[in-house]
Image: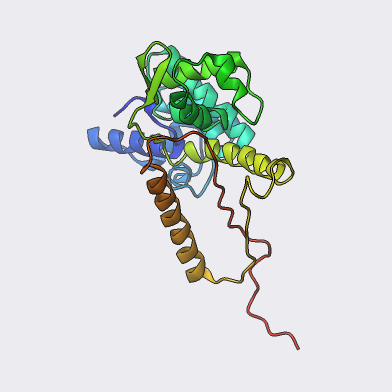
Amino acid sequence: MKSILEYKDYHLYMQDYYDERKRLGAFSWREFCKSAGFSSPNFLKLVCMGESKLGKSKIENVANALGLIGFERDYFRALVAFGNAKKDSDKKAALIEMQKIAIEHKVRLVDGDAFQYYESWKYPVLRELIPMMPGANPRDIAEECKEHVSAEEVRDILSFLLKAGFLKKDGEKVYSQTEQTVIGSKEALPIAIRSMHKEMANMAARAVERYSPSERYFTGVTLSVNEEANRRIIAEIDACCKKVLSIANEYQDQDQVCRINFQFFPVTDKVKETHHA
């Protein structure tokens, strides 16, 4: 069974533990529950299936049943907090704690770099901008950004982009993008991306007043849809994003970084099938 530090879903970790114990010999959900102090013989099975949550007061008992000690127990606490959190801020705090424990014990979480990359608009924007400005110092780069970023932040972000493999150094103050794609797990990455979406949406709102119509293009429609139309529209937007990137990549003399936001979201509840007189 792999290390707990490789998990980001406590339900899956507990299920894998149960399966491993079952593989090695006689073991039942009743025995598992009893060792964790539960009177119900199938409660932990329901937890693993996602039909029940592991309450905070029961974490230590379950950790004992799993045989977790030291940093593994600490990681399990954060893992449960991450899985049970309702708010993005709580999920983020738990994920950061998981990353901290993993790093301290020399295990790198795949989602660590992706999480930080999507945490702020500054990372992807500077990844695009820095290669356009060979020989520039952090202050010069910072001054080209429409939104505020300090020279110190540029320096720190550049260091991260190099270390994480998003940029490579070609010479003295000369950088280029790598072919690396930012990939994270389905559990962690959406949290980071939501943070960026909020930032980009706020930037778009400011752009309405900040730039003249000749410098920006805004459009939108309000429409009625059903589930099939919803799926088709999302697929069309995805295809459009890929086409836009393809067009941009046809050119080698880029001189500006831009952002496109596609915002397709409900503005009413679904109407129930009732007829109004």
Query: Residue, x 50% and y 70% (percent of image)?
Result: 229
Q: Position of residue 273 (x, y in %)?
A: 63, 79
Residue positioned most to the top: 172
State the residue in front, 55 or 267.
Answer: 267
Q: Position of residue 258 (x, y in %)?
A: 54, 40
Say if 76 sits above or below 268 in the image.
Answer: above
State the residue in front, 40 or 259.
Answer: 259
In this rendering, does residue 69 appear at all? no
Query: Residue, x 61% and y 51% (percent of image)?
Result: 217
Q: Is residue 48 left or right of residue 21?
A: right
Residue positioned most to the left: 24
The image shows a total of numbered marks equal to: 0
Q: Position of residue 86 (x, y in %)?
A: 62, 41
Q: Position of residue 153 (x, y in %)?
A: 58, 17
Image quarter of the C terminus:
bottom right
In this rendering, does residue 181 appear at all? yes
State the residue in front, 254 or 258.
Answer: 254
Say if 33 sits above or below 225 in the image.
Answer: above
State the residue in front, 32 or 73.
Answer: 73
Q: Is residue 28 left or right of residue 195?
A: left
Residue 164 figure quarter: top left
Residue 170 figure quarter: top left
Q: Is residue 83 left or right of residue 266?
A: left
Tell me the colour scheme of the image. rainbow
Image quarter of the N terminus:
top left
Query: Residue, x 31% and y 27% (percent of image)?
Result: 2
Residue positioned most to the bottom: 277
Say if 240 sits above or below 36 in the image.
Answer: below
